[in-house]
Amino acid sequence: QFRGRFDILSDPITALITLDMSAPLVQLLGPTTRRTEDSSVALVVAFIEDRDPSPSIRWRVNGGQWYPYAGQVDVPLDVGRNVIEVECADAAGNVGTGEWTIERMEEETPLTTWLVAGVIVVAAAVLLGLYLLRYRKGRDEE
């Protein structure tokens, strides 16, 4: 209740004030591995927020540009160490974070590639051998 300048009282005022002092809890459900040969991984995020039913969620990889998160996304990975960061902000401005480090290994050369390369080398050696035999035979006849 407020008293005005001319000794007039206002009607009583009742206000419910809710303070939101806690940040959303962020959990990364995916990826679930620390090493991969894949060029991307599926990012799956879960959060717990008691006041804001739809907080703002965003992600980035290796300190790059932030992207909005709207369900599962494929995160591209560089060869080597990758850090995936997630931020979840509620309406009160509280920010919860999550982070996952994953290493992308260089893809190994498939066995079939080595076999094909071996066949090519053997074929080249055989052809070279045949050529040399023919060349020598021609020189011997002279």
Image (cartoon, rainbow, N blue to C red):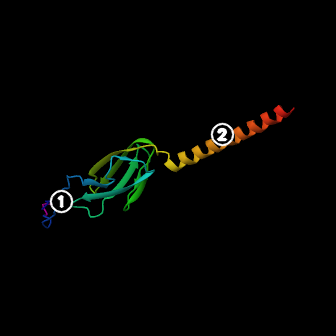
* x and y, in percent, of residue 19 in the image: 18, 56
* x and y, in percent, of residue 74 in the image: 42, 56
For the residues marked 1 and 2, what is the alpha-carbon distance in whole angstroms?
82 Å
Report the magenta stretch's main SS: loop
For the image, the number of numbered tags is: 2
Q: Verify whether residue 5 appears in magenta.
A: yes
Q: Which residues are magenta?
A: 4-8
Residue at disc 1, secondary structure:
loop
Please tell me how crowded label 1 is: few (under 14), some (14-19), or many (20+) other residues with Cα within 10 Å.
few
Which label sits on residue 125? 2
Q: Amino acid at mark 2?
A: Ala
- Residue 3 lies left or right of residue 62; in this view the side is left
Q: Verify whether residue 90 appears in magenta.
A: no
**Can residue 88 be seen here?**
yes
* x and y, in percent, of residue 12 in the image: 12, 66
Q: Which sits in the foreground, 56 or 93?
A: 56
* x and y, in percent, of residue 18 in the image: 18, 59
- Residue 83 lies left or right of residue 116; in this view the side is left
Image quarter where the N terminus lies is bottom left
The residue drawn where x is 43% and y is 52% is 40
Q: Amino acid at mark 1?
A: Thr
Where 46 sits versus 35, above or below? below
Which label sits on residue 18? 1
